[in-house]
């Protein structure tokens, strides 16, 4: 391909009737004032989309437009162009066409970038237009820090040498001991975790080696292995960052700190635990800047969403969200709080720990060391004249009883509980020692939820059911099983070969109607279970999971995994 011609983006969009002359004039004035790229001004002002710009450039230059969502990128080819230049020029090497390399660029009219890329790769290049957002996401995904982490781990190992050092004792005299290599290593770990959307980082000393794993979409993946001798240094540095007791290695400790990764603030919850070969450290990553707390963005079915919204708008009562650890309960409650938050209402949360930070809400972190537990904070919170109270978890009978009494006296109380499904939750409260009448009069609704992995849209492909999967689906679909089409992800560069990318919620809602309340007051639990199941009318976790399978959003195996957690 010959060197591209220099063209004016605004004129192309006007010629192709995607932009008016007036909009072009406004955008040029905005560009002059702000210094932003003209294409970015068009998109951010809502005049055109990135796809429209890419399509217009492709037609003008007579080159292809590639949708990277459906392009299986070869990481080895991409790395022919160093990361710095790839980010600078918004470019990716996509194909080796035996004599020329196909390079995707968001701005193929950048002649300097074209010349620089050709010089770096030392081959002829052919151009394609790609969406800027997609190319930057691909760069984040492919230029991972795995090699850097391994190199930095070896560097730290060499610095430590063969001498056994008590880092806890030395750090008291010299807090900056080994700071540079440790900080570089940890920063690379956090960068890599953010790039692959990891929710947790596990640093685990094993016999003769240190293992670092990331949890991505609910599944752990090995990131790297290093020499065991660097484990104490990593644990020490993380404790210093979390204001934990660096001299205490015999007891578990919990803390938190914040890091910045690519101009994003990430809150880190840290837990340390003594193990046979050293201290195991687990960190939960909470991306505050990238979190959108909206109820209609978490995958709740329309019917459940409308009922749940109406329930949390009530002036009083208890609303519980249930499910296992890591099922998104706190996120759901904070989505509700974000919608309820207004200057007319006072909101107080009692949590362990505080996971999200919202302006205008009074958030309290419990601290058992000074006997600042849920029950004590909740009693004090009720004297603060709140309208809405969020209790992180109903851990014991005392907390549950206080929460229910608050719900009876004009407060809306939101909380979580660990139960298998919505129907069993009222019975669980009674088992905890809460009086039956309080459950019936105060509990408004129970939302049970799970998280299922979503099929990667870049490599989704039709799938033939196994006999076991067919039999399981037939319990919900009967003879309609063979009329459906089923899919799975075959694995690609977008999902790191897993076939899944991202997760969505699976929900069921039990509303405490008059019939359900009457059944809750019946001493026979079998009667309550029967009435509650009838009230839900088959809108269960299992039914929602099957609906996602039919829509092609998840696999049968994922739906079965979620369903098996709630089987009787």
Image: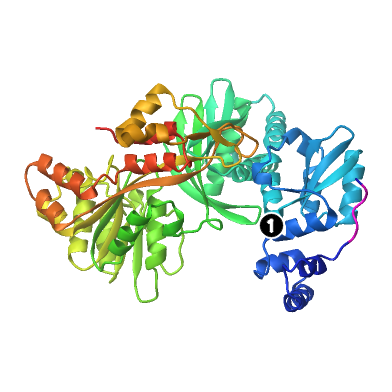
Q: Residue at x 27, y 42 (%)?
A: 421
Position of 294 relative to 209 (above/below): below
Q: Residue at x 73, y 35 (%)?
A: 74
Q: Which residues are magenta?
A: 2-6
- Is residue 384 inside the magenta stretch? no
Q: Position of residue 190 (x, y in %)?
A: 61, 44
Provide the major secondary structure of the magenta segment. Answer: loop
Here the colouring is rainbow
Position of 184 relative to 150 (above/below): below
Report the side of 405 relative to 259 (left or right): left
Residue named by callout 1: 51
Report the side of 195 relative to 378 (left or right): right
Q: Position of residue 32 (x, y in %)?
A: 79, 75
Q: Residues within 10 Å of mark 1 (few under 14, many from 20)?
A: some
Query: Considering the image in quadrants, where does the N terminus appear?
Result: top right
Give the quadrant of residue 323.
top left
Q: Is residue 419 visible?
A: yes
Position of 240 relative to 515 (above/below): above
Foreground residue, 71 or 383?
71
Q: Is residue 250 visible?
A: no
Q: Position of residue 328 (x, y in %)?
A: 41, 47
Q: Position of residue 177 (x, y in %)?
A: 65, 41
Foreground residue, 554 or 369?
554
Query: Considering the image in quadrants, where does the C terminus appear?
Result: top left
């Amino acid at each position: 391909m010959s060197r591209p011609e220099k063209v004016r983006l605004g004129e192309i969009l006007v010629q192709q009737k995607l932009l008016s002359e007036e909009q072009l004039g406004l955008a040029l004035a905005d560009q002059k004032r702000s210094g932003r790229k003209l294409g970015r001004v068009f998109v951010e002002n809502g005049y055109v989309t990135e796809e429209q710009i890419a399509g217009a450039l492709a037609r003008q230059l007579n080159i292809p437009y590639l949708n990277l969502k459906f392009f299986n990128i070869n990481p080895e080819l991409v790395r022919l162009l160093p990361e710095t230049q790839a980010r600078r020029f918004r470019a990716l090497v996509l194909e080796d066409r035996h004599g020329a390399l196909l390079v995707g660029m968001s701005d193929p009219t950048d002649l300097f970038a074209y010349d620089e890329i050709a010089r770096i790769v030392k081959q002829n290049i052919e151009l394609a237009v790609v969406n800027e957002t997609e190319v930057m996401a691909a760069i984040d995904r492919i230029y991972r820090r795995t090699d850097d982490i391994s190199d930095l781990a070896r560097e730290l190992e060499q610095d430590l040498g063969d001498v056994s050092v008590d880092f806890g004792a030395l750090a008291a005299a010299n807090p900056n001991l080994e700071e540079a290599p440790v900080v570089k290593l940890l920063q690379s770990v956090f960068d890599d975790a953010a790039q692959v959307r990891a929710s947790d980082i596990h640093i685990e000393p094993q016999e003769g080696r240190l293992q670092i794993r990331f949890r991505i979409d609910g599944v752990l993946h090995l990131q790297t292995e290093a020499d065991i001798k660097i484990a104490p240094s990593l644990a020490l540095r993380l404790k210093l960052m979390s204001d934990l007791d660096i001299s205490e290695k015999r007891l578990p400790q919990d803390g938190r700190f914040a890091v910045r990764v690519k101009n994003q603030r990430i809150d880190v919850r840290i837990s340390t635990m003594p193990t046979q070969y050293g201290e195991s450290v687990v960190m939960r990553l909470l991306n505050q800047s990238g979190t959108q707390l909206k109820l209609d963005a978490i995958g709740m079915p329309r019917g459940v969403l409308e009922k749940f919204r109406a329930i949390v708008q009530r002036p009083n009562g208890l609303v519980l969200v249930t499910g296992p650890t890591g099922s998104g309960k706190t996120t759901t409650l904070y989505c509700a709080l974000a919608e309820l938050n207004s200057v007319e209402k006072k909101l107080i949360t009692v949590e362990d720990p505080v996971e999200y930070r919202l302006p205008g809400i009074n958030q309290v972190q419990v601290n058992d060391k000074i006997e600042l537990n849920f029950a004590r904070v909740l009693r004090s919170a009720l004297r603060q004249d709140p309208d809405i109270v969020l209790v992180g978890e109903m851990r014991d009978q005392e907390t549950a009883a206080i929460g229910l009494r608050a719900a009876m006296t004009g407060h809306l109380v939101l909380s979580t509980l660990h139960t298998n499904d919505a129907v069993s939750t009222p019975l669980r409260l009674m088992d905890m020692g809460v009086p039956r009448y309080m459950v019936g009069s105060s509990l408004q609704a129970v939302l049970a939820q799970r998280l299922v992995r979503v099929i990667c849209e870049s490599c989704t492909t039709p799938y033939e059911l196994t006999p076991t999967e067919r039999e399981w689906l037939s319990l919900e679909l009967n003879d309609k099983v063979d009329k459906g089409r089923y899919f799975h992800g075959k694995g690609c560069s977008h999902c790191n070969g897993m076939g899944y990318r991202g997760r969505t919620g699976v929900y069921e809602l039990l509303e405490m109607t008059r019939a359900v309340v009457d059944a809750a007051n019946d001493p026979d639990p079998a009667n309550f279970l029967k009435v509650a199941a009838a009230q839900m009318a088959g809108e269960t976790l299992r039914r929602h999971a099957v609906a996602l399978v039919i829509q092609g959003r998840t696999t049968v195996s994922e739906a079965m995994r979620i369903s098996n957690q709630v089987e009787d």
